[in-house]
Image (cartoon, grey):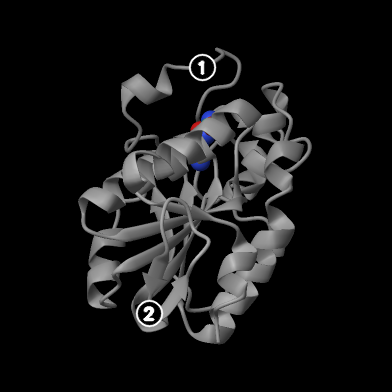
Amino acid sequence: MLTIASTRPSPYTFTPATTALLVIDMQRDFLEPGGFGESLGNDVGQLRRTIAPLAALLAAARAAGLTVVHTREGHLPDLSDCPPAKLHRGAPSRRIGDPGPKGRILIRGEYGHDIIDELAPLPGEPVIDKPGKGAFHATELSDLLTERKIQSLLVTGVTTEVCVHTTVREANDRGYECLVLADCVGSYFPEFHRVGLDMIAAQGGIFGWVAESTDVLAVLP
Ligand code: TIU
């Protein structure tokens, strides 16, 4: 059992054998210059600062034998898994399924939908394709974590206040102890990022803990 003393709001304890590193939606269309996210006017630099620390954490997690799970947000080519409420939102020229700079936007199998090369999953590492913001909705994630007897989640990825928050809130309700790594999650909106992290750790850790990836690296075997 490992303990990180510097986590907010209190020390965080986890056992590598029952811990998964969750890497949420580190997809080209959200992170790469010229991608969907940037084409909407967002500063992808706010997300790209997560790549280096996350690559280091990923390497350490693999070396320590943690389960590593990647997720991708996206839809079937016929959009049958995309609710109208999601499909019909956003700028009319840039909707899910439309042609984008790196292929059809948020469609499985398109170049822009896939995970950035720097964090490419290793063969055998599960990649969860999710149609929603949360990683549990309409996915096999719950079964996968149950099969592997996972109790703790080290949560990384983008964006802090959207897919990371949705996933952590639900994981907490499902009984997982979630540690969110502040330097490995990012938002296009720095204020949302900062407040999003504060929300997690507030009220005695209302739905999780917050630390830096170096705090994890310091305790991993
Ligand atoms: N992965 C994720 O957070 N999807 C989003 O759509 N995020 C936004 O912040 N838009």
Q: Earlier in the sequence, mark 1 or mark 2?
A: 2
x and y, in percent, of residue 150 in the image: 30, 72
Q: Nearer the viewer, residue 167 or 138?
A: 167
Query: In the image, what residue occupies the spot 45% across and 44% down?
Result: 164
Circle 2 residues within 10 Å: few <14, some 14–19, many ≥20: some
The amino acid at mark 1 is Gly
Q: Name the residue carrying label 1.
A: 90
x and y, in percent, of residue 57 in the image: 62, 69
Judged from the image, the secondary structure of the residue bearing numbered disc 2 is loop
Circle 1 residues within 10 Å: few <14, some 14–19, many ≥20: few
Q: Is 140 situated left or right of 113 in this image?
A: left
Q: Is mark 2 within 8 Å of ligand 1?
A: no
**Total marks in image:** 2
Q: Quadrant of the C terminus?
A: bottom right
Query: In the image, what residue occupies the spot 33% across and 39% down?
Result: 203
Q: Is 15 situated left or right of 221 in this image?
A: left
The amino acid at mark 2 is Thr
Instruction: Point out which mark residue 15 bears.
Output: 2
Q: Is residue 165 above or below residue 40?
A: below
Query: In the image, what residue occupies the spot 73% across and 48% down?
Result: 49
